[in-house]
Image (cartoon, grey):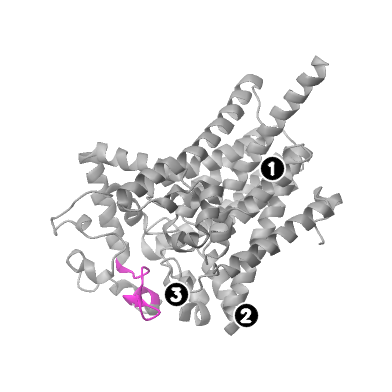
Amino acid sequence: MKGLSEKNTGITGREAGMIIVLFVISRIIIRIIGIEMDYQALYRNWQYLSVDTLRHDLLKGVWYDHTQPPLFNLLLGAILKISGSSAPLIFSLCFKIITLLNTFLLLRLLKENAKHKNIPLLLALIYLLSPATILFENELFYTSFITLLLLLSCNYLSKYQVAGKPGKLFGFFLPLALICLTRSMYHLAWLVLPWLFILFRSREKKYAVKVLLTGLSLIILVSGWYIKNSLIFGSFTTSTWGGMNIARNVFHDAVITDSGQIASIEPFSKISAYTHFLPPDPAADFKGLNDRDLLQEMKNDSFINEKHAGYIEISKRYMQASKQQVKDHPGAYLKNVMQSAIIFFAPATRYPVNEAQARKMKYYDLLYSFNLSQLAEGKKERRIALTLSALPKFICYFLVFFIVVRTWIRKRQIPLLHLFIIYVTGYIFTVSSLFEHYENMRFRYEAEPLFLVLAGAVLTDWLNKRSNKKKQAI
């Protein structure tokens, strides 16, 4: 248990033992009821390079990938190369280790920022035993990995907040840079803003130059991938799918019957479905770079290859169509944005990819997550259930953020960690509501442990005030 001692983290042996015991017992039960790692996601997920590329041409495949930042494909390929035929077991173990690390990092943050005897452990266990945590732990995707990076970053920011040592800022910025290199939603600008704020706050400090160089070096690192994509694919971004992503939200529930409009085709369809919108050889400029991933319509024999170079043009056309749709029908788009905003607060177990697994613990999910969709049948009932299921989470978030902001206004100051958590949550909520549809609950859950830190601080403060009033009344 090196690194988890009370001296280093404040986590006692009793707390660590309780977490590990409950983790082992709960995961044995979960395995008995049939929830396990979905290894087929490695072959199926749009975000991943073909398995042959991951195994044999990893660096080349990652370099010529125009759809995703490089880090997670690098991790997948490295594990495949190292583990060979044992890959399914290794992936399962790695994701379980990530869950434990997330829980300990969350507990450490809570003990530093919510000074209470029981609240830190209680909230850490709420995260550990959550149905959503269990499901994402068994999904071969980057959700819990993003959570790990966010928690690492916040732990270093918390240490900087207490000690004021500039060396801690590298530990804060590095995970943020890695997040930008893992998931395209976390844009370069998302990394730049915290750096500028901390640079402004430390402008009169002796270590201001260190803050400047630390953040700048990591911003340059992330910018390199944007520049690479701009030079090779003509797109200053880490993903050329932006147009297809926003089209799923803009054209949700819209009926487009004119086959001459690209919106009549569901985004992320096979590249052959877009023949009329592409030149005869849409990937001609990219032949010889990475033919397996950039030129083939299918990957791993039977799954759509969304990395085909033709999608670069298709995504641009979807973006143009989306802009026109918003201009012509702003009310319809705002309605879809509102639906996405509601979905943000829905139980994370409503994430479509995991719903089949969630049904295996139907009643536990219903009680723990208030996931009323477990009882609903039919599209209309499920929509109503989704809205009702989102209410408890919305109320919790509203109350916690209202209290934090009110305290900020009254005291005219706010802990740096709290400000960063507000920034991250607000960013995810805004971007996912505007650009995505029906995945927002997963995006929220990536940062849910950060919300638990705020909730722990608010709850501790309320209990302390209540205790003080009782003492004064005696």
Which badge, 2 or 3, is on the more N-terminal residue?
3
Q: What amino acid is at disc 1?
A: Val
Q: Secondary structure at mark 1?
A: helix
Where residue 22 sits in the image (x, y, percent)? 71, 58
Q: Secondary structure at mark 2?
A: helix
Q: Which residues are magenta?
A: 293-310
Residue receiving disc 3: 43
Question: Which residue is located at x 49 percent, y 51 percent?
Answer: 348
Which badge, 3 or 1, is on the more N-terminal residue?
3
Around disc 3, counting alpha carbons within 10 Å, would you say few (fewer than 14), some (14 to 19), or many (20 or more)?
Answer: some
Where residue 161 sits in the image (x, y, percent)? 73, 38
The CA distance from mark 2 to mark 1 is 41 Å
Query: Is 407 located above or below residue 428 in the figure?
Result: above
Where residue 280 sits in the image (x, y, percent)? 20, 73
The outermost residue toward the bottom is 85
Query: Is 422 located above or below residue 253 in the figure?
Result: above
User: Is disc 2 in contact with disc 1, using a CB cutoff of under 8 Å?
Assistant: no
Query: Is 397 located above or below residue 320 in the figure?
Result: above
Q: What amino acid is at disc 2?
A: Ile
Q: Which quadrant of the structure image shows residue 222? A: bottom right
Q: What amino acid is at disc 3?
A: Tyr
Residue receiving disc 2: 82
* In front of the other: 215 or 339: 339
Question: Which mark is nearer the camera, 2 or 1?
Answer: 2
- The verdict on residue 84 being magenta is no
The CA distance from mark 3 to mark 1 is 46 Å
Around disc 2, counting alpha carbons within 10 Å, would you say few (fewer than 14), some (14 to 19), or many (20 or more)?
Answer: few
Q: Which mark is residue 209?
A: 1
